Image (cartoon, rainbow, N blue to C red):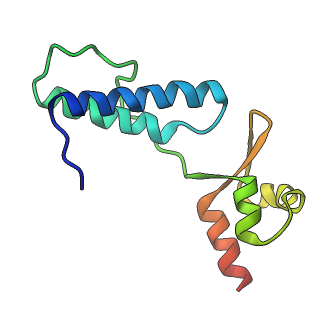
Amino acid sequence: MVVLSGPALKAARDCALIAVKHRKMSGVPYRTYEALACELNEAVSASGQADMRSPAISKAVAVDRPNVPITEAAARLGISDRHARRLAPKLEGKKIAGRWFVDEIALRQHIEGRQ
């Protein structure tokens, strides 16, 4: 557990917003950071600090399942990147900005099923 208040809370929210912006521009998953920014914004609002600027995110968003880059998935499976790309659709993979990402939960289930 981490407790933030005052300027630290505002700085954490701003960091989450910066992460969202850069991850969107890079074409990598950003929904988790967006949800974090929403939660931090609600905490700032609840503390009554009205002098802070309003963030770009004003409502909560659904958090997607965590995504794992295909190179990490290949390493965890002990297979080549090429073979991992072939398996990606079976692992609920998505191609984002030309790079494959697979679902963390599907990857874990695949690993457990092989054992």
Percent of width and height locating residue 30: 54, 36
For the N terminus, the quadrant is bottom left
| Above or below 109: residue 21 | above
| Above or below 107: residue 7 | above
For the C terminus, the quadrant is bottom right
Q: Give left or right: position of 4 versus 34.
A: left
| Above or below 76: residue 82 | above
Corner quadrant of residue 52: top left
Percent of width and height locating residue 72: 70, 58
Looking at the image, which residue sits at the far left?
A: 48
Residue name at image x 69 percent, y 75 percent: 111
Residue name at image x 31 percent, y 34 percent: 12
Residue name at image x 40 percent, y 18 percent: 56
Corner quadrant of residue 99: top right
Looking at the image, which is closer to me, 6 or 24? 6
Residue name at image x 16 percent, y 13 percent: 51
Looking at the image, which is closer to me, 61 or 96? 96
Corner quadrant of residue 89: bottom right
Counting the numbered discs, the total is 0
Q: Give left or right: position of 59 versus 87.
A: left
Percent of width and height locating residue 50: 14, 16
Percent of width and height locating residue 16: 40, 32
Q: Give left or right: position of 37 versus 67.
A: left
